[in-house]
Image (tube, grey):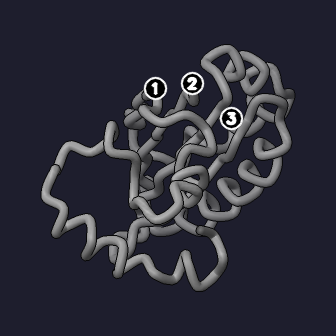
Amino acid sequence: MVYTLVVHVTAKDDDAIPKLHAKLVEAALVYNRDKGTIDWFVMQEEGKPRNFTVVERYDSKDATKFHLENPYWSRFNDYFVPLIVDPMDLRRYDELLSQGAGAESRKYGNKVIPDDKKVDNDPEIWGKIDKHQSHLREQGNY
């Protein structure tokens, strides 16, 4: 099961914004190459440039150990922590769908999703969703 960390941070001041931006981009390029890392996304909040979010996706909780052993980590933290308002908001999640399940859902043929995964049993809505997603048929994805 995919293990995900979501980290929200706020820059201490406007001078810290470009430094955080650059460091987070650098970190994403480094950490995306770590064993067990599925993806390491960095984002800046629209309209609130002092707010940043990092979404770290790992193939397991154990993969975070390898991440923390990367020699870059301590240097990253030494640079990063003085630039942010304390404390950072770090949340840990177990994803509900396995890795690749979203892409797999394109292979359900003429069904939007399998009947056993549906909570809403109104056939009319599923017909409308299928029509809305007709681009998948046009692309040959089902």
Mark 1, residue position: 94
- The residues tagged by marks 1 and 2 sit, at their Cα atoms, a distance apart of 7 Å
Residue at coordinates 68% horizontally, 46% vertically from top-left?
39
Which amino acid does the dot numbered 3 rest on?
Asp
Image x and y of residue 134, in percent: 45, 81
Q: Viewer-proximal residue, 16 or 31? A: 31
Image x and y of residue 84, in percent: 47, 46
Vertical placement of residue 26 versus 126, above or below: above
Q: Viewer-proximal residue, 89 or 77? A: 89
Residue at coordinates 42% horizontally, 63% vertically from top-left?
50
Q: Is residue 21 left or right of residue 131?
A: right
Q: Is residue 10 left or right of residue 32?
A: left
Secondary structure at badge 2 equals loop
Q: Earlier in the sequence, mark 3 or mark 2?
A: 2
Badge 1 vs badge 3, beta-carbon distance below 8 Å: no
Which amino acid does the dot numbered 2 rest on?
Met
Nearer the camera: disc 1 or disc 3:
1
Vertical placement of residue 33 versus 15, above or below: above
- The residues tagged by marks 1 and 3 sit, at their Cα atoms, a distance apart of 28 Å
Q: Quadrant of residue 131?
A: bottom left
